[in-house]
Amino acid sequence: MNIRTFCMLGWVLSFLLSCQRSSPDPIIPDYTDATRYYQEGEVEVIQQYDDNQIFVVFVADGYTRATLRKDGGIYRSTAIQHIEYLFGQAPFSQFRDHFNVSIIYAASTDSSTAFNYGDQPSSQMDGEKLARYVEAATGIEGFSEQVQVLFAVRRPVNGFGGNKTAYFPADQPDIMLHEVGHSFGNLGDEYQYGQGAPLELLADPGTRGVNSNLDITDDPEQVKWKRYFGLSGYEDVGIFEGGFYSDTGVWRPTQTSVMRETRDDGLSHGFNAVGREAIVREIYRLEGKSLSFEAFLEIDQVNVE
Ligand SMILES: [Zn+2]
């Protein structure tokens, strides 16, 4: 190495060092800086409703610590997008002020692996950790019927909904809505693909109205949603064959709904009347109140005008 090259290297080195000194951002961000980053397990309350104890908590997996920036981080913007989407849809839009809503921040070491229901949990999130975080956010121990968890996963996954947990790919809020239909409203799938699940599962509506949007009879005197027939504003409610994964032998109340098909254009088919009723009934049940069909129709009036 001649002296000239050496000097050049020294100049380049000092230039780089001076750049580093004058840069406003450190090369390695300090993720422990709580003024700039949400911390692991931190809870942000979005809205509080003191009169009862129904919660919606958002948590995500596959998001690195860098995404937990307070100023414009995508973890928070993803959470807000999904929360707003949920409370933009009837009947949640009508009952928004009945819910405590919060975001739980949880960082993953990378975005390629994620918690999978049914699989071995990854190092990112597991059921025990999720339960601990949800308890911290709600003050309620374990998984409770009072707590609807919105679990967004930052990679393509099949949605899953049950026991007040909706699990969905983070860029598909309409899939989230569908899974909330399962997990909050106990609604069944209104879609079909050939041979379905055992139909006897549908025979018993159960004490909590499980699968109130599906039936194995097409008798208008018998079908679960018969009370809607002939009502003004509910002309779309009928008896449509296909649902619960079967082409035949199962009937659903409307041609389409979010329980039959989701959209990826930011819009939604929304819940049909039977789905809206199931969700309103669940809100009332959790609040310890009873709801007559007539009272529901009054609540639902704004959706059919
Ligand atoms: Zn489904």
Image (spheres, rainbow, N blue to C red):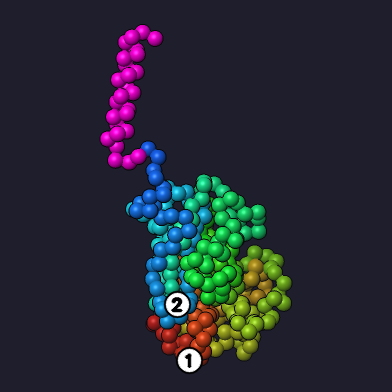
Which is more toward the observer, 209 or 285? 285
For image coordinates 62% across by 54% down, the residue present is 121
Residue furthest to the top: 2
Identify the image quadrant of residue 76.
Answer: bottom left
292 vs 35, left or right, is right
23 vs 76, left or right, is left
Is 5 in the magenta? yes
Q: Secondary structure at mark 1?
A: helix
The location of residue 204, given as percent across then percent down, is 68, 82
246 vs 269, left or right, is right
Sequence-wise, the earlier of marks 2 and 1 is 2
Give the main secondary structure of the magenta stretch. Answer: helix
Query: What is the distance, in whole Å, between disc 2 and disc 1 at their CAs?
Result: 16 Å
The location of residue 36, given as percent across then percent down, is 35, 51
Identify the image quadrant of residue 198.
Answer: bottom right
**Relative to residue 97, is residue 62 depicted above or below?**
above
Residue behind label 1 places its C-beta within 8 angstroms of ligand 1: no
Residue 125 in sight? yes
* Residue bounds of the magenta highlight: 1-26
Q: Amino acid at mark 2?
A: Pro
Within 10 Å of the Cα at label 1, are there few (<14), some (14-19), or many (20+) other Cα atoms?
Answer: few
The location of residue 13, given as percent across then percent down, is 33, 23
For image coordinates 52% across by 63% down, the residue present is 133
Mark identifier at residue 91: 2
Q: Amino acid at mark 1?
A: Glu
**Relative to residue 227, is residue 135 depicted above or below?**
above
Residue 257 in sight? no
Q: Secondary structure at mark 2?
A: loop
Image quarter where the N terminus lies is top left
For image coordinates 55% across by 52% down, the residue present is 124
- Please give the residue where the numbered disc 1 appears in the rendered image: 294
The location of residue 120, given as percent across then percent down, is 65, 54
